[in-house]
Image (cartoon, rainbow, N blue to C red):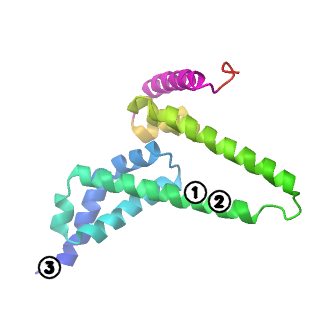
Amino acid sequence: MSRPSDQVSPALEAIVARFAERVRYIGVQHGLTGSDVEDLVQEVRLRLWKALESGEKILAAPASYIHRTAVSAALDLLRRRRARRETPARLSRPSGLARLGEVASADRMVEELELQEQVGRAIDTLIPARRGVVRMYLAGYSREEIADVLGWTEPKTRNLLYRGLADLREKLTAMGIGPRAL
């Protein structure tokens, strides 16, 4: 007779295999790229294992639970990534900078962060299909890579990307951001 813990691993593998593409898509929607997307899949696997503890509970987990777990894990990965970026920036600042130079650089950093937040808010207003494609494109993925990741044809990806970028340009211009806004 098998112990309950012997049933956890196959159940966990089955649920992760079933939802892996959805978890990756959630990661991409949240701006994760490359190995961070794969880290997200592993983080979801770990969270399911810790929270549900038995094969029956894991297999009975509804899709909404997996979705919420993936979103939560993606946000945590983003927070950790941001924390890693801030620490080296502070440590790598040249020690010989004049106070005036530091203020100017701090102002520029704040302006860049505000711009990133405004662009992020504008992207959040796009329709979901366009939002994910635009995020991936701005993260550096090519149209072909986006089509592969999302399982779409290249023409569909191209269409959604171009329409999404046009919508984004329009929204940013309306917000006073961009060349026409000057």
CB-based contact (under 8 Å), mark 1 and mark 2: yes
Picture coordinates of residue 151, whole percent (x, y)? 39, 37
| SS at mark 3 in the image | loop
Q: As drawn, is 41 to the left or to the right of 136?
A: left
Q: Which residue is drawn at 56% across and 36% down?
A: 118
Disc marking residue 86: 2
CB-based contact (under 8 Å), mark 1 and mark 3: no
Residue toward you, 133 or 68: 68
Residue at which label 3 appears? 2
The CA span between labels 1 and 2 is: 6 Å
The CA span between labels 1 and 3 is: 44 Å
Picture coordinates of residue 147, whole percent (x, y)? 46, 34
Residue toward you, 124 or 98: 98
Which residue type carries mark 2? Answer: Glu
Residue toward you, 102 or 79: 102
Q: Residue at x 43, y 54 (%)?
A: 74
Q: Residues within 10 Å of mark 2 (few under 14, many from 20)?
A: few
Front tag of 1 and 3: 1
Residue at which label 1 appears? 82
Q: Which residue is drawn at 58% across and 61% down?
A: 83
Quarter of the N terminus within the rendering: bottom left
Q: Does the magenta stretch include residue 27?
A: no
Picture coordinates of residue 59, whole percent (x, y)? 19, 60
Tell me if residue 181 comes above or below residue 26 in the rendering. Answer: above
Quarter of the C terminus within the rendering: top right
Magenta-colored span: 152-177
Q: As drawn, is 83 to the left or to the right of 97?
A: left
Q: As drawn, is 156 to the left or to the right of 111?
A: left
Numbered-mark total: 3
Residue 25 appears in view = yes
Residue 140 appears in view = no
Picture coordinates of residue 125, whole percent (x, y)? 44, 31
